[in-house]
Amino acid sequence: MGGFPFNAIVGQDEMKLALLVTAIEPRIGGVMIFGDRGTGKSTAARALAATLPPISIVENCRYHCAPDNPGKCPDPCTSKRTRKIAVPFADLPLGATEDRVLGTLDLERALAHGERKFEPGLLAKAHRGFLYIDEINLLEDHVVDLLLDVAASGENLVERDGLSVRHDARFVLIGSGNPEEGELRPQLLDRFGLSVEVRTPEKLEDRVEIMRRCDEQERHPAEFAAAWADEDQKTIKRIQRATKAVAKITTPEAILQDTATLCQTVGADGLRGELTLMRAARAYAAYHGKKTVTREHLIAMAPMALRHRLRRDVLDETGSTVRIERALAELFG
């Protein structure tokens, strides 16, 4: 209780869809959310994590090892007991040091007992859940590099202070930022699977509804959560079904051709665009209960998967989203 229900968020459909498909298929590689302050970026990420069903872990394991895969961490997590915990959600503050992120030697234990024991960092806390970074464009570049490397490999390796520690660190990386406060390096932005843009709602009725719901949630959190419980439960079931089905979704050869043609037409850098778009379209199809990816699924996910991968064209200063939509119209009608 107390958190804002995911389905109670007004508008911001693209952001919510990006978070949903990434929860279904973590290999998409996370979500970068650009937008104005106070548009519900962190609220949506927290709400989705809170909506997801609890996960099972080995009792007393600080690294959230799954019961069917114990002992993959520095802890002796050999307990036969398990317990349920909420899906992990870790916030990475702007001033976080490498030690805070990666983990380090437990100095207090070393000084008091003469033991070398590893103190896990935020990457361990986020394992099997979400790692959220607000104002990522203001974070130090070397910390972002570390995060993206771990997010891509799914493993954290720490070698310092005479320790050599390795543990799984698989999480959905969510970054947010305001472009007015500094750009994110293109090579780092490219490492995010999806990129979405959120804006302050322009419709008066939407702004009024947001005020109404926020006020109700603050004054009567339990009742407000109960009112949206059925909708959130439906979302949970759809995510669970889609997560099980996504590996079986068929991607026809024609869709692969369409994906490559689109990426080539818009001038997307590298091949991450094709791979991300294919995975995102597949997750989108699974979310809608389909067994085969269609061009409709491809078109729906294309702006999110490609807008942050376009080369700047000095002869065409239109926005990346417009360029993608124009290419979609030319290629597919």
Image (tube, rainbow, N blue to C red):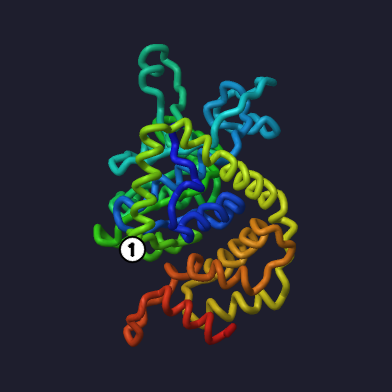
What is the residue that sits farthest to the top in this orientation? 113
Give above or below for 154 relative to 288. Answer: above
Give above or below for 71 relative to 16. Answer: above
Seen from the viewer's position, the closer of residues 10 and 143 is: 10
- Residue designated by label 1: 202
Seen from the viewer's position, the closer of residues 36 and 8 is: 8
Question: Relative to 156, is 143 on the left or the right?
Answer: left
What is the residue that sits farthest to the left in this orientation? 181
Q: Amino acid at mark 1?
A: Glu
How many numbered discs sit on the rendered protein? 1
The residue depicted at 58 percent of the width and 54 percent of the height is 27
Q: Picture coordinates of residue 166 (x, y %)? A: 53, 37
Give above or below for 298 relative to 97. Answer: below
Q: Picture coordinates of residue 12 (x, y %)? A: 43, 57
The residue depicted at 74 percent of the width and 62 percent of the height is 291
The residue depicted at 37 percent of the width and 42 percent of the height is 214
Q: Secondary structure at mark 1?
A: loop
Question: Relative to 9, is 264 on the left or the right?
Answer: right
The residue depicted at 49 percent of the width and 36 percent of the height is 225
Query: Where, quadrant-wise, is the C terminus in this rendering?
Result: bottom right
Residue 101's quadrant in the figure?
top left
Q: Picture coordinates of residue 85 (x, y %)? A: 56, 29
Give above or below for 211 relative to 303. Answer: above
**Structural crowding at the residue carrying mark 1, measured as other residues with C-alpha within 10 Å and reported as few (<14), some (14–19) or many (≥20):** few
Seen from the viewer's position, the closer of residues 265 and 142 is: 265
Residue 170's quadrant in the figure?
top right
